[in-house]
Image (cartoon, helix red, strand yellow):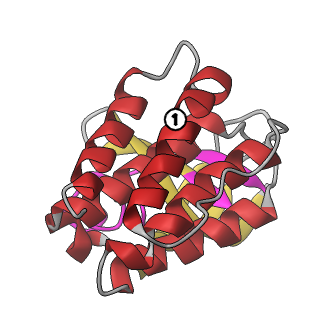
Amino acid sequence: MHIRVPAIIIATRAHGETAAIGRFLTEDFGVVAAYVAGARGRNLRPVMIPGNSVDLQLSAKSASQLPFGKPELTESRGPWLVEPLPAAAIGWICALSATALPERQPYPPLYSALDGLLSAICHAPSARGWAGALVGYESLVLRELGYGEAYRPQSEEMPEILSAMDRLGPVLEHYLLADRHGDVMAARTRLRERLERMV
């Protein structure tokens, strides 16, 4: 296997002294895990941040082997990780994607939606510009995985968005994050609390 695709980093886990196992969301191949040599070194550490967009080269001798990955940064979300609200939002949606989505199953609408949502989080003047889209992304994940209808806020007003988040939370926890929801749902709770301070 030798492929080169645009990808979004959704999770990283340290492996050995300087390497990491990265999980990447791609449009054509879904979630792909790859061994990235030097991922925690000086050159790749700023690249291997969940939320970043990369040009990813994958190579493996067989389909069953964990591929080697070489990511090249195409868009960094790092500058926004120093802001509490964008950092909480990026952390939550990447954690949800990494936890809920099965590997090697493409979901092109989710790739496009995540890319658009990350751009909105980083470039909208305030959370009012992306909070509704975040709830829409959560709902789209549920729908794409076969768990039913959309839970869209009825307006772009923050109280209505928070109400939609509250309705959606138990559904996400029950269907997508059962038995593995601890830290993932904690990330959502932090985001919910920070959004509520805006009201």
How many numbered marks have been drawn onto this rendered protein structure? 1
Q: Which quadrant: the C terminus?
A: bottom left
**Residue at 25% in and 36% down:** 17
Residue 24 horizontal/vertical position (percent)? 57, 54
Q: Left or right of 177: which side holds 58?
A: right
Q: Is residue 165 above or below residue 136?
A: above
Say which residue label 1 marks: 169
Q: Left or right of 86: which side holds 144?
A: right
In which quarter of the view is residue 109 placed? Answer: bottom right
Residue sitting nearer the eye, 37 or 27: 27
Residue sitting nearer the eye, 84 or 112: 84
Q: Quick check: is 9 in the magenta stretch?
A: no
Q: Quick check: is 33 in the magenta stretch?
A: yes
**Residue at 44% in and 66% down:** 131
Residue 44 horizontal/vertical position (percent)? 31, 64
Q: Is residue 74 above or below residue 33?
A: below
Q: Would you say residue 52 is visible in this rendering?
A: no
Q: Is residue 135 above or below residue 27?
A: above
Circle 1: residue type: Gly
Question: How many neighbours does mark 1 have within 10 angstroms: few (below 14), some (14-19), or many (20 or more)?
Answer: some
**Residue at 43% in and 70% down:** 157
Residue sitting nearer the eye, 10 or 133: 133
In which quarter of the view is residue 90 placed? Answer: bottom left
Residue 171 horizontal/vertical position (percent)? 62, 30
Disc 1, SS: helix
Query: Magenta stretch: dominant SS?
Result: loop
Q: Which quadrant: the N terminus?
A: bottom right
Residue 125 horizontal/vertical position (percent)? 30, 87
Q: Left or right of 178: which side holds 142?
A: right
Q: Would you say residue 29 is visible in this rendering?
A: yes
Question: In the image, which residues are magenta?
Answer: 24-51
